[in-house]
Image (spheres, coloured by chain):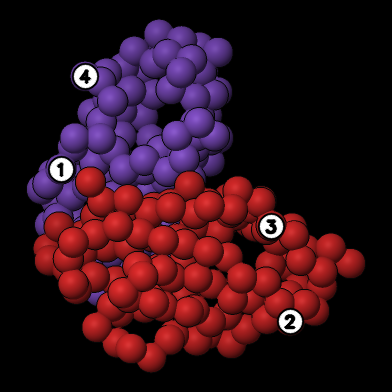
Amino acid sequence: DAGVIQSPRHEVTEMGQEVTLRCKPISGHNSLFWYRQTMMRGLELLIYFNNNVPIDDSGMPEDRFSAKMPNASFSTLKIQPSEPRDSAVYFCASSFLDSNQPQHFGDGTRLSIL
Amino acid sequence: AQTVTQSQPEMSVQEAETVTLSCTYDTSESDYYLFWYKQPPSRQMILVIRQEAYKQQNATENRFSVNFQKAAKSFSLKISDSQLGDAAMYFCAYILPGTASKLTFGTGTRLQVTL
């Protein structure tokens, strides 16, 4: 079975540019999570969706960050405009709605904002 | 606030030896689930083992086992017969039951495996 698929794997761009990260969850999973990992803050939950509906976006750092899940098989995390402090590894994870089930992570996108 | 504490930023173990990584958590709930995730240099987050809080029996997955002490809110990971491939960051996490499946992670322990 294919796992959680994230693209791109690496992204380098200049500050001020729009960045879009993509995620395809595991087929059948109905919860999707976006995390950010940095040395300073560790793993932070940015936002999560249940059945394509955003449930908690309190972890989204600023209005420059937005996330969408137009259907059960696709989600995007957008940063506009990007800043150097947004540089991090961004993970997408998915799971079944039941919290007994573990979250399965994608390979992450390493984002570097110059 | 719900928190997870991993007090060992780094640990080292010799190949074939046993190492224990500590984790404590703070929640007022009585029902929850606990997980250990492994993150090797490839940066994948890989589920190692999980434990249901209502089960007294400690979970075991091959060379990995946990020591779950509910009263002490402690959830340590024991790796037996350590292998070079075990070198990674290890994250402890828990989640409360319900439809809001929000994992709370610790800050991680970096495990080195030496020859």
Q: In this view, does B65 lie to the left or right of A81?
A: right
Q: How crowded is mark 1: few (under 14 residues within 10 Å), some or many (20 or more)?
A: some
Helix, strand or loop for disc 2: loop
Query: Judging from the image, what is the letter of the chain drawn in purple?
Result: A
Establish if B51 lies above or below A90: below
The residue sitting at 55% across, 59% down in the picture is B90
Q: How far apart are marks 4 and 2 (CA)?
A: 48 Å
Helix, strand or loop for disc 3: strand
Across and down, in percent, residue A60 comes to: 25, 31
Residue at numbered disc 2: B81
Give, as a three-letter code, the residue at label 3. Answer: Met
The chain ID associated with circle 1 is: A
Which one is closest to the eye, mark 1 or mark 3? 3
The chain ID associated with circle 3 is: B
The residue sitting at 49% across, 25% down in the picture is A87
Give, as a three-letter code, the residue at label 4. Answer: Asp
Which residue ends up furthest to the bottom in the rendered image? B57
Q: Quadrant of the N terminus of chain A?
A: bottom left
Query: Judging from the image, what is the letter of the chain drawn in red?
Result: B
Question: Mark 3 or mark 2, which is nearer the start of the sequence?
Answer: 3
Q: Residues within 10 Å of mark 2 (few under 14, many from 20)?
A: some
Q: Residues within 10 Å of mark 4 (few under 14, many from 20)?
A: few
Relative depth, front residue between A83 and B15? B15
Across and down, in percent, residue B75 comes to: 43, 70
Relative depth, front residue between A96 and B56? B56
Residue at numbered disc 3: B11
Q: Distance between the residues labelled 2 and 1?
A: 41 Å
Return the mark for residue A63: 4
Residue at numbered disc 1: A56
Q: Distance between the residues labelled 1 and 3?
A: 35 Å
Badges 4 and 3, same chain: no
